Amino acid sequence: MTEKTQSLYLQEKMLRGSAWLTFSNVASRLLGALYIIPWYAWMGTHAKQANSLFSMGYTIYALFLMISTAGIPGAIAKLIARYNSMKEFRVSQKVLYRALQLSLGLGIIFAGLMYVGAPWLAKISGGGTVLVPIIRMLCFALVTFPSMSVIRGYFQGNNTMEPFAISQVAEQVIRVLYMILSAFFIMQVWQGNYVTAVSQSTFAAFVGMLASYGVLLYFLKKEAPFIRERLERSRDQVTFETRVLVKEIVKEALPFIVLGAGVTVFKLVDQVTFIATMKNFTGYSHDQLLELFSLFSANPDKLTMVVVAIATSIALTGMPLITSLATQGNRHELGKMLSLNLQLFVYLITPATFGLILLAYPLNTVFYSADRLGSYVLIESAVAALFIGLFTVASTLLQGLDHDRSAVFYWLIGLIIKSVIQVPLIRVLEVYGPLLATMLGLAVTCSLSLYKLRKVAYFDHQMTLRRSLLVFFVTMSMCALAFGMRQLCYLFLTPESGWQAFLICLLTASVGAISYFYFTLKIRLVDRLFGPRAKVWRRRLKIR
């Protein structure tokens, strides 16, 4: 394979994997955002409190999830990519089997700990006793998720993203369906309690995972002949005892624990400090504080996580390829792959972020209510999501290059900065304070991570910067057209009405997306990122 052919092959592999994961992540996040419209309405006067309790329960669950999985899925992907590049396929299979055993045990242990510790966790989170059953309902999912995510890590390490992607969509479809049906029957048919409805909404995570498990096992069975063929070609020059293999898995997994839980820990700082700090210097009631917490944490997450999902897709696809190239010592292709990852991030995230900012008010109306404060907080959340996305990509790339300690250290610096400035910013800015503290902390983390990537990988940072600036200017052109469409819509439609706000979002977003894609095709920027397929798109759209 020539150097040019290899480069195109790796680019195609990266783009194909990113496309599958972007589709599944965005589809999953959209489903996770769309369910909130009927769910929120059915909760009636308790909507904001219900959403706050749901968010608090999920934050605790997410932290336990990261601890119980022990970073094993990411470590599995990295180890399998490494041993596959060495053609030690039998070791890769052993890694999978031992990781499944380890993750199943960890899931049972930590689910038990979360169940027993639910009253204490509810107390320190500020949710009160009503949060206890919600936390306990999530324990079922905690048993299942670690072993399921190991199988996803196996497919990720093999750069086979289709099973990973389809399992995510199946999980989310079944989860959302269960949430909507349970909320409807409890609140609308049986006139039940909103805490019961929220508890069943969190139990939906377990139901969704059963669907995901089914999809993954189907693809594993389908892959069996290919797996047997690779085992026959295995070099078998590397052998491990079970104890040594488990030790290597755990060693690789530790940084994934910290960085995988990185954003969740930032949110946990918000959860622990916001209500307690606000109680000390304001006269808000507990219910009012839950509503404010919902405005900056639970509500915008449903929308901004779509942006983060794109970054996650790029990071998950890029990491095994980066590890393989680093193992092979192919520094030239490694630098190009790093640059491609960062450019894809900028190309996709920049217009998405500015689109959220431009449509903050009507989007907030569609999903929640016509709320000026909620829309302002959503704008700040969109900017924060940009930093979260960059952190996800940069830290994952560092892990792929075996600079795990640096990635963890930079995250720790960002966390310390956030923790120090969190309370003062809450006192001065109230609901805006936690998000600003997150942005400032992650800004430092991202800067240090990018500097380290440039230092160890020697990628063309000047070209990456130039193209990033070009994307920014194209995005500003897109925003000008989208802003014009939004203002035109305001002449005939009002963002105060849910359905009219939806039409405003649909028309404005369509103009923005079409214009952005047209401009980047016209100036040949898409060619640099997507290769020969850009010519096909340009020909079909008759763009010269």
Image (cartoon, rainbow, N blue to C red):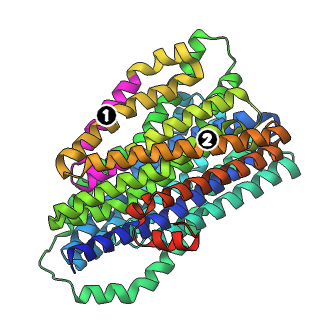
Rendered position, 388 above or below 174: above
Question: Is the residue marked by circle 2 packed among few (<14), some (14-19), or many (20+) residues within 10 Å?
Answer: few
Amino acid at pointer 2 = Ala
- Please report the residue visible at 54 percent of the width from the left and 63 percent of the height from the top: 24
Q: Nearer the viewer, residue 338 or 519?
A: 519
Which residue does the numbered mark 1 point to in the structure image? Answer: 412
Question: Is the residue marked by circle 1 packed among few (<14), some (14-19), or many (20+) residues within 10 Å?
Answer: some
Q: What element carries label 2?
A: helix
Rendered position, 154 above or below 218: above
Mark carried by residue 480: 2
Which residue of the protein is positioned furthest toward the front in this rendering?
544
Whether residue 29 is in magenta: the answer is no
Give the main secondary structure, helix, strand or loop, of the magenta stretch: helix
Mark carried by residue 106: none
Q: Which x, y percent locates residue 191? A: 87, 45
Q: What stretch is highlighted in magenta?
A: 393-419
Measured in 3D between alpha carbons, the distance from the residue under mark 2 to the one under mark 1, in whole angstroms, is 39 Å
Q: Which x, y percent locates residue 334? A: 23, 60
Rendered position, 241 above or below 456: below
Amino acid at pointer 1 = Leu
